[in-house]
Amino acid sequence: MLFNIASLASVVTALAALTTSAVALPLAHQLEARAQCAATLSTAHSVAQRLQSKYWNGSGWGILWTDANTIEDLYNLMLAEGTSTFDVADSTRIGQLALQQNRDAWISALGGSNDDAGWIILSLWKVGDYRNVRGQNSAPYFNSAKIVYDIIAAQWDDSKCGGGMWWSTAHTYKNAVTNELFLYISASAYLRFGDQAYLANAQKTWNWLKNSGMRNSDNLWNDGLTDSCTNNGQQTWIYNQGVIASGLAALSKATGDTSLIAEAEKTLDAAIQLKTQNGILKESCDNAAPTSTCDNDQAMFKGIWMKHLQFYLDLVPDRTSKYQGFIGAQESAVVHYGTGSEFTVGNVWYAPSQGGSLFTAQTQTSGLAAHVCTAKYGPC
């Protein structure tokens, strides 16, 4: 579903592209060299600089899972532009844990949060990719990602709801995003490292998800399951609709099953139709006036959707033309509606803020993700 973004201010055009070298990963799987829009990357760089100047506290920007996404976004940016400006991972709590490579330390830090662990794995891989490109030691980051993966893989439980990953070690809830993340990281781990156990985990996760009932009649994923293992009807958070797509694309790449792309796009297209206002992503807690009600978690969800759309298109680049217009519209909205002074980005993208936009480290990171996605797959 393409969007005409003429109703929004024009996206900057006719600028030179940047190309970076392919990333050397532990086995044969390679990240392809990417052609980037220079103007959009320049905006992304300015947003990242503001993130650091305004929100960096010396060891992070917020809580563990949002910091994991921030790390991933900063290193995604640096891989795109070929710079080292924001190489701060070793100073963060996640980086310090990575360098320790200690299972008990990771268990303590995770506090039983299996969904947090999924985001952390993705951040560790992204830093590892960056280290490889720079000819630096990536082993602590990849080793720690393996440690964390093995911790959460043990949380799969067939005894409740026929399978699935528990949201936490308290074993009280099975939800969409934890299992979507496990699908994505398992399929991606197979593509990276070639271990059949990862592929088996990805396949069983998708088989469980598609039969779980969490995807509703609108093709959107609700938050999770009730105690009786039925769809709980809770919010269809925007990030749930993005992570499933990257996971299915990775599994399609791993297996050659192209029907998974159609499954992914059922949800991507439903999100574009049903989770937008004026053609722009709008989370349920976003309000231009009088005020948004998003917490710091929710304020990051739109950026995560954009990032996972990027990851989706990394795996199925022939689908780019379908989504390019929509991607460009989001970035234009972030620039013209979401951005305040000094490249500070708020959570309201769908309309000019009338005092309702929140400005936090998480909204800044969300905007950064939108710019980096657009630099690769939006108009230029």
Image: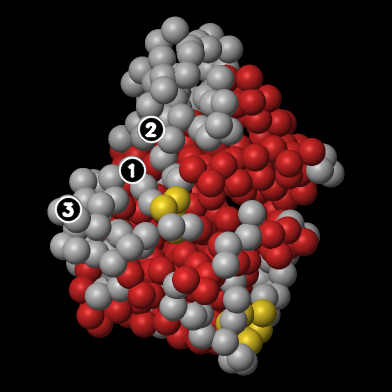
Regarding mark 1 in the picture, which secondary structure is present there?
Answer: loop
Q: Label 2's element?
A: loop
Residue 28 placed where, x, y %? 78, 60
Q: CA distance from mark 3 to mark 2?
A: 19 Å
Q: Residue at x 72, y 50 (%)?
A: 191
Identify which amino acid the numbered label 1 is placed on: Ser
Query: Label 3, on which residue?
Result: 291
Contact, mark 3 vs mark 2 (Cβ under 8 Å): no
Indicate the amino acid at tag 3.
Thr
Q: Residue at x 69, y 53 (%)?
A: 192
Of labels 2 and 1, earlier in sequence is 2
Circle on res. 235: 2
- Side of 125 relative to 292 (left or right): right
Mark sitting earlier along the chain (3/2): 2
Check the image and report above or below for 350 versus 47. Answer: above
- Residue 351: where, in percent of width, then height? 33, 63
Q: Which residue is mark 1?
A: 284
- Residue 211, given in percent of the width and then of the height, sits at 63, 20
